[in-house]
Image: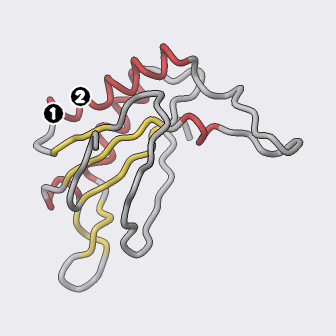
């Protein structure tokens, strides 16, 4: 087992061509503050930072897969591996330095079996360039 958290968020992070440190900073500021956890009334009103939960970050280039043509996804929009690894590591390290969250990771570029319990289920897509 590489990275493990109890309650919190699993962040599947896809790094696209053209992503920069500004995109990393956007996500570092946005993710811990998103009010996506239920309060006592069952309303999404609490953030990960408020809960003190963990964050498991997994690099996931397949999020950039284009399936519009043919039967095999194309990954032309994914950043090259060196850039993706640099920005992924910057994301993780910046979260560790600027928040009180427990931040765990998988192994960059490795084939992994990731287990999670999706409570709700609740899943969000965040794009730093929309």
Which x, y percent locates residue 104? 24, 40
Horizontal placement of 17 versus 50: left or right?
A: right
Q: Quadrant of the C terminus?
A: top right
Residue furthest front as drawn: 1
> Circle 1 — which element?
helix
Horizontal placement of 79 versus 98: left or right?
A: right
Residue furthest right as drawn: 70
Query: What residue is rendered at 28% in x and 44% in y?
Result: 1
Horizontal placement of 80 versus 111: left or right?
A: right
Instruction: Give the answer, above or below, for where 33 lies relative to 60.
Output: below
Instruction: Give the answer, above or below, for where 32 lies relative to 106.
Output: below
Horizontal placement of 64 versus 56: left or right?
A: right
Q: What residue is pinned by disc 2?
A: 94
Tell me which corner region of the image, top left, top right, bottom left or bottom right, holds residue 93: top left
Which x, y percent locates residue 115? 39, 57
Which x, y percent locates residue 26? 37, 35
* Mark 1 nearby-residue class (10 Å; few <14, some 14–19, many ≥20): few
Query: What residue is rendered at 31% in x and 72% in y?
Result: 44
Query: What residue is rendered at 33% in x and 24% in y?
Result: 89
The residue lying toward the viewer, choosing from 66 and 109, is 109
Residue furthest top as drawn: 82
The residue lying toward the viewer, choosing from 97 and 109, is 109
Q: CA distance from mark 2 to mark 1?
A: 6 Å
> Circle 2 — which element?
helix
Instruction: Give the answer, above or below, for where 120 lies relative to 51.
Output: below
Which x, y percent locates residue 71? 85, 45
* Mark 2 nearby-residue class (10 Å; few <14, some 14–19, many ≥20): some
Residue furthest bottom as drawn: 41
Q: What residue is pinned by disc 1?
A: 98
Instruction: Give the answer, above or below, for where 124 lies relative to 32.
Output: below
How did the renderer colour the structure?
Answer: secondary structure
Mark 1 and mark 2 in contact (Cβ < 8 Å)? yes
């Amino acid at each position: 087992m590489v990275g493990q958290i109890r309650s919190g968020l699993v962040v599947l992070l896809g790094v696209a061509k053209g992503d920069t440190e500004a995109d990393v900073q956007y996500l570092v500021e946005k993710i811990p503050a998103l009010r996506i956890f239920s309060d006592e009334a069952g309303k999404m009103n609490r953030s990960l930072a408020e809960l003190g939960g963990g964050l498991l970050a997994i690099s996931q280039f397949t999020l950039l897969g284009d399936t519009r043509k043919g039967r095999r996804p194309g990954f032309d929009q994914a950043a090259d591996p060196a850039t993706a690894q640099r920005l992924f590591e910057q994301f993780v390290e910046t979260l560790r330095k600027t928040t009180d969250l427990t931040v765990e990771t998988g192994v960059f570029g490795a084939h992994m079996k990731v287990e999670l319990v999706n409570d709700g289920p609740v899943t969000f897509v965040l794009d730093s360039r929309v």
